[in-house]
Amino acid sequence: MAPFKKLIGGWKFTPLSPEACRIEFQLDFEFTNKLIELAFGRIFKELASNMVQAFTVRAKEVYRADKLVVEVLMRCRKSSICSAVTLEEGATVEEAIRASGLLELRTDIDLAKNKVGIYSRPVKLTDTVQDGDRVEIYRPLIADPKALRRQRAEKSAGR
């Protein structure tokens, strides 16, 4: 009797640049009975999740892939500017932004004033980036959202 009722899995490689890709491993499984699931379920899930990490570590050893690929993004009023950069491990958010060339392209960006984030989470310029991160440069607010809501409420109350 086999331990699995269902065992389906697959690797997914998403290109990030000519020398890097995102690696995902999806595994869908179901044991034949609850006793086997109780005995081996947690171990098997952990083993499956460690496969991607082991694959990545081995690829870095074989191909000397000690570089990070990071996207740097700034949304403008009517468009977005996005640049993928390759950096050394341990690189900071500020180094990623400077390497992207966006500071030369958009002279209105002031790192002392503009807030930055990674995947919509605020970060500091000195925080380190990870492979596959999306560094975002946020535009300053033109108007206070609370004040705008208050004005709209007053306007609708005056009708």
Image (cartoon, grey):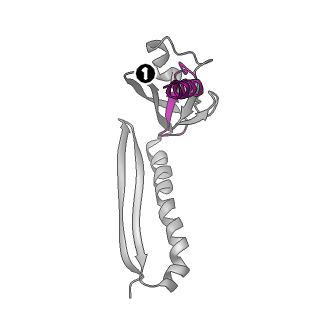
* Nearer to us in this view, 74 or 96: 74
From this viewpoint, which residue is outermost toward the top? 107
* Nearer to us in this view, 77 or 51: 77
Residue 61 at x, y = what percent?
A: 49, 47
Quarter of the image where the N terminus is located: bottom left
From this viewpoint, which residue is outermost toward the bottom? 1
* Nearer to us in this view, 79 or 102: 79
| Horizontal arrangement in the rendering, residue 36 relative to residue 16 (left or right) | right
Query: What segment carries the magenta color?
Result: 130-159
65 to 3, vertically: above or below: above
Whether 76 is among the magenta residues is no
Q: Amino acid at mark 1?
A: Cys
Residue 85 at x, y = what percent?
A: 45, 29
Whether 148 is among the magenta residues is yes
| Residue at image mark 1 | 76
104 to 76, vertically: above or below: above
Residue, x 54% and y 39% (percent of image)? 130
Q: Residues within 10 Å of mark 1 (few under 14, many from 20)?
A: few
Residue 90 at x, y = what percent?
A: 59, 35
Q: How many marks?
A: 1
Q: Secondary structure at mark 1?
A: loop
Residue, x 50% and y 12% (percent of image)? 108
Residue, x 54% and y 80% (percent of image)? 38
